[in-house]
Image: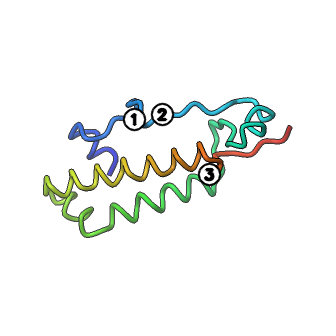
Amino acid sequence: MIALLVDRGLFDFNELRNTLMLPVDQELANKMQISVYSDDPLLAYTSGISAQLERVWNSTQGVAARAGDSSAIEHIAKETYRFAATVRDGLINGDVFVDVKET
């Protein structure tokens, strides 16, 4: 799904709204009450992200997008950005954690 959106120019991983700098230092992350950065995220995090993206991809709009329906592809792009914003907000608010490291 993401590859389809990227190929169509409808999703950009490097766009500012898709980036968030998380602290590498666990003590700082704890003080900020947010997730520490991880290049090896928790399985629960990656599974949750994948499950949500699969839900969108397997929706009626996702099926139409895979069949080439351009309005469905645009809808899926909006849903993907909406989901990314939700995850970002969850990370900023300390409701979502990429990893928890020992201090």
Look at mark 2 in the image and give the residue it sits on: 19
Q: Secondary structure at mark 1?
A: loop
Q: Position of residue 28 (x, y in %)?
A: 76, 32
**Residue type highlighted by circle 2:** Thr
Q: Residue at x 57, y 30 (%)?
A: 21
Instruction: Please tell me which residue lies in front, 31 or 3.
Output: 31
- Looking at marks 3 and 2 on the same chain, the residue that comes earlier in the sequence is marked by 2
Instruction: Please tell me which residue lies in front, 3 or 72.
Output: 72
Q: Are marks 3 and 2 in contact (CB under 8 Å)?
A: no
Q: Secondary structure at mark 3?
A: loop
- Give the left or right position of residue 39, taking residue 66 as reference: right
Q: Position of residue 24 (x, y in %)?
A: 70, 30
- Looking at marks 1 and 3 on the same chain, the residue that comes earlier in the sequence is marked by 1
Does 28 appear above or below 44? above
In the rendering, which numbered label is found on residue 25? none
Look at mark 1 in the image and give the residue it sits on: 13
Does 27 appear above or below 93? above
Q: Quadrant of the C terminus?
A: top right
**Number of callouts:** 3
**Residue type highlighted by circle 3:** Val
Q: Residue at x 64, y 41 (%)?
A: 40
Q: Secondary structure at mark 2?
A: loop
